[in-house]
Amino acid sequence: MSIWNKVDTIIVSIVRWFDKSRFWIKDKIFFFREIWYLLQWGVWLVDALSVIASSSSNYALKDMSTKLLYYVNQWKNFSYGLNRLPEYFTESDYGIIKIGEKSWNLAQIFQSLASEYAFLDEIKNKYISAMMYPILLVGIALAAVLSLFLLVLPNIFSIAEQFNVSDLPPMTRMLKQFSDFLMVYRPYLLGWLWVWWFIGTIYFSTNAWKRTWFSIVSMIPYFGTMTRNYYLIKRCRYMHLMLQAGMSYVQMFQLVKNVMQVPAYQDMLDDVLAWLEKWQTIYTAISRQSDIIPSSVAMLLKVWEQTAQLDKAIENVLIMYEDELNTMIDRLAKIIEPIMLVLIWGLVVVIALWVFGLILHIMEGVGL
């Protein structure tokens, strides 16, 4: 084997590893939609998996489809293969598709799963896009301020010392003290930042921090409402999908609990399941969770539960809150940009005035 063949092999191995370790939501959406399209055209499931495995340029999809094809060829259910690929599929995917197999409605389940993932990914991307600009502004501002204190101000203060300018204004002295502090303790500060980052990554992954963070975000005006609406929509869309698949209430809430990664909602769903085991209604269970479930939603569920049309109630909730969430995200993008610009430019102007004040003081000290 020549050196170039070895290089090609290494590159292909790296690409395969990257694809397998970076299985995105868009890849799952593509997979579910492709399966649905092929089944709609009358292609057998085995042949559909074979087509995806042979034609996809994504190695994660190739690997996943090949393994699923192996299980199906062994006369195993499709859900059986999904349950053995936790790196690609969640427990809720497995549960929903398993119910779809029993109801002989697998093609529709694939379409519904793709739609749910696509909608939630769209909402998430809209929220990230709305926040990207202010986060970028804050990052640039912090970098500029640090550069000012570490690179610019030390040189200006050294010039002031050369001209024996000692009577500095109070704010200028504060700038000098902070700049000297950063210059002297910079290595220690970087070390402490690394230590706190390491400790933070461990603590931030705990349920205690997730509960605390959710409580903090929930108390922030506007952001708290957006967060609660997002998780309400996410929960209701999965509940609607699971009811369409033919799940019982207990199965539905158990799977929704696995989908929701927020401890506060998992605690709420545990409470709901406990009440359902006592043969209580869903309204009785969720009416005790007024801090998470809006009272209007609880009343809708109560009315439709009494008429045995819970799926209709969930559809109405989605119609109301999806529009509200989209409006809030669009409004956030319009409001937050000018606010951040005013704050950042205000900070820049204040620091610039302090720096120019120092320069003018130096010029006065040397008689210019």
Image (cartoon, grey):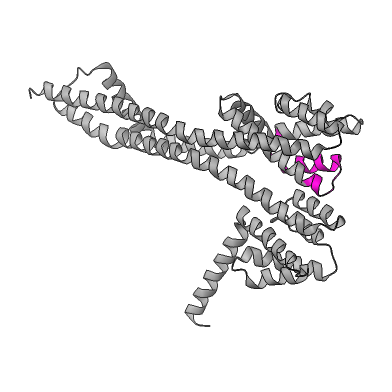
Residue 206: x and y, percent?
66, 36
Q: In the image, is 67 to the left or to the right of 249?
A: left
Q: In the image, is 179 to the left or to the right of 365?
A: right
Q: Is residue 260 visible?
A: no
Q: Residue at x 77, y 26 (%)?
A: 299
Quarter where residue 222 is shown: top right
Q: Residue at x 12, y 25 (%)?
A: 363
Front-most of residues 158 and 244: 244
Residue furthest left in the image: 367
Q: In the image, is 229 to the left or to the right of 96?
A: left
Quarter where residue 184 is shown: top left
**Location of the C terminus (image quadrant):** top left
What secondary structure prevails in the magenta region? helix
The residues colored magenta run 242-263
Residue 277: x and y, percent?
90, 33
Q: Residue at x 80, y 67 (%)?
A: 72
Q: Is residue 184 visible?
A: yes
